[in-house]
Structures are given as structure tokens and as C-alpha cells.
Image: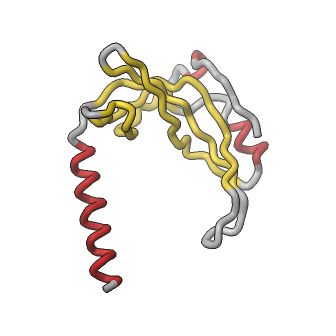
Amino acid sequence: MCVVAAMGVTYFGRRRERLRENWPSANGRSTGTRIVKKPPTERFPITMYVGECSVKYTVGDKQYSVWLASGYLDQDPKFIEDKMQACRVSRYAIHYNPQNAADSFNGAVHMMSNLHRLPISAVRI
């Protein structure tokens, strides 16, 4: 029974991903950073700090925002704070649900060299 359930979850997860790949996309720009404290869990018994980037994108005439993982995580909040002075990525391809543009995910990420021009609004723990 568990094997059948796992196969069903895998099938529906893959199907959802294929549907999402066909969603339209909008250009997104990083606008800030934050650090999120992730408490220990049974599977990972260490408190971790995760850097996230705020990304804004526009669909039609309405602006949306989403928090995306920066790729930085560590046990030391100071290490993450130092890394999160700016996002490493300034432009994103945000795929959004055509029925609800607030439902989105990050597609291809474009690295940019002009990180010194990004606005920063760090949230400290």
C-alpha cells in the first residue's frame, strides 16, 4: 500500500511540475534580503539560518513579490548576515499561474555583475 501511495505522490508531483513549466513568465528583480531561522527537526537536529531574496515581478499592471532561497544556509547567523548584504542574483525568470499570478516559482536564474546597484533592506534575527 505504501509503495502505491509513494508512486501516486511522485506521479502527481511530476505532473504538477510539467504543468508549471508551461506557465507564462515575467522578469523579476531582487529588492531585498532576509535571514530566516529554521528550528531543528527530527530529521535535521540543528538550528539553521537561511538567506532569502525578495523578488518583485509585474503581471499586467499589478506588482507581486515572492521570497526565494539565496543558496546560503549555515548554523552561524553572522556568516549568513555577511553573505546576505545583497543577493547574488539580480534578475529572475518568475513563472506564474495564469489564473492567479501570486502563485509563482523561480525558473531560470540570470547572474548579473552589477550587484552593487541593488537596493538592500536586510531583516535581522
Quarter of the rendering occupied by the C terminus:
top right
Quadrant housing residue 26: top left
Q: Position of residue 2 (x, y in %)?
A: 35, 83
Q: Residue furthest front?
A: 99
Name the quadrant of the N terminus: bottom left
Work out whether residue 77 or residue 62 is closer to the camera in this orientation and state it.
Answer: 62
Q: Is residue 19 left or right of residue 71?
A: left
Q: How many marks?
A: 0
Taking the spot 27% from the left edge, 80% from the top edge, the residue there is 4
User: In the rendered view, how is the structure colored?
Assistant: secondary structure
Q: Is residue 115 toward the left or the right of residue 124 in the image?
A: left
Please name the residue shown 39% across and 32% down the image. 102
Residue nearest the observer in this picture, 107 or 65:
65
- In this view, 78 is above or below 122: below
Where's residue 60, x and y in %?
30, 17
Please tell me in which quadrant of the rendered image residue 3 appears: bottom left
Using the rendered view, name the quadrant where residue 62 is placed.
top left
Residue in the image at 50% along x and 39% along y: 68
Q: Residue furthest bottom?
A: 1
| 38 on left or right of 52 | right
Can you give x and y, in whole percent of width and height, for residue 80 in the image? Answer: 70, 43
User: Residue shown at 75%/35% (left/top)?
Assistant: 124
Residue 15, horizontal then vertical, whole percent = 23, 57
